Structure formats: structure tokens, C-alpha cells
Amino acid sequence: RRGPLRRAAAHGIPAVAIVLDLDPAIVLDRNARREHRAVPEVAARRQLADLARSLQPGVLEGEGFRAVHVVRTPAEQDALTVAWRSAG
């Protein structure tokens, strides 16, 4: 996450985190069904544990993110739209 934070700071814009925090069963199922791109289950579980630690109150904000948006369901993920605005 340091890279995006550095780039945002270099351009004088706030860093915003969009976090996909789906149910672990959904994540593991989707990963298992990925053809030719699945990561080992142990790695996926480790990433899920890292994510849980990152979502503790104040962690991402403490790293420098101005806002943190958490997506928790597949419906929220499907409805997600990211729009870029010019900084000027």
C-alpha cells in the first residue's frame, strides 16, 4: 500500500482505500474456480487474515488513507462504481 500512498502524496491528492471484505467462504470458492490463476488456498487464507488486521479501527487511516470504503457483499461489489475527478 505504500506505493499508492506515495503516488497520491506526490500529486497532492488524498489516498482513498476501497477494500473488498467479502465473506471468506465466497473468496475461497471464487479462488478455487479461477482457471489458471488460482492462488494456493494457504496464501488466500493468509491474505484474508492480513485483511482482517488491516480493517481494525484506524489502521488504514493511520497509514495515510484519507477515506476507507469497505465493500462487504457481492451485491455491493457488483454495484460499485469508481469515478475519477480531476484534482484541479
Image (cartoon, rainbow, N blue to C red):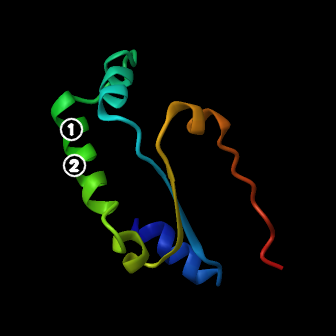
Q: Secondary structure at mark 2?
A: helix
**Closer-to-camera residue (63/52):** 52
Q: Is residue 87 left or right of residue 35?
A: right
Q: Residues within 10 Å of mark 2 (few under 14, many from 20)?
A: few
Please report the residue visible at 26 percent of the width from the left and 45 percent of the height from the top.
47
Res 35 quadrant in image: top left
What amino acid is labelled 2 in the image? Ala
Q: Residues within 10 Å of mark 1 (few under 14, many from 20)?
A: some
The Cα atoms of the two marked residues, 1 and 2, are separated by 6 Å
Count the numbered circles shown. 2
Mark seen at residue 45:
1
> Vertically, is 59 above or below 50?
below
What amino acid is labelled 1 in the image? Arg
Residue 2 lies, in percent from the top left, at 40, 71
Mark seen at residue 7:
none
* Pointer 2 residue: 49
Circles 1 and 2: CB atoms closer than 8 Å? yes
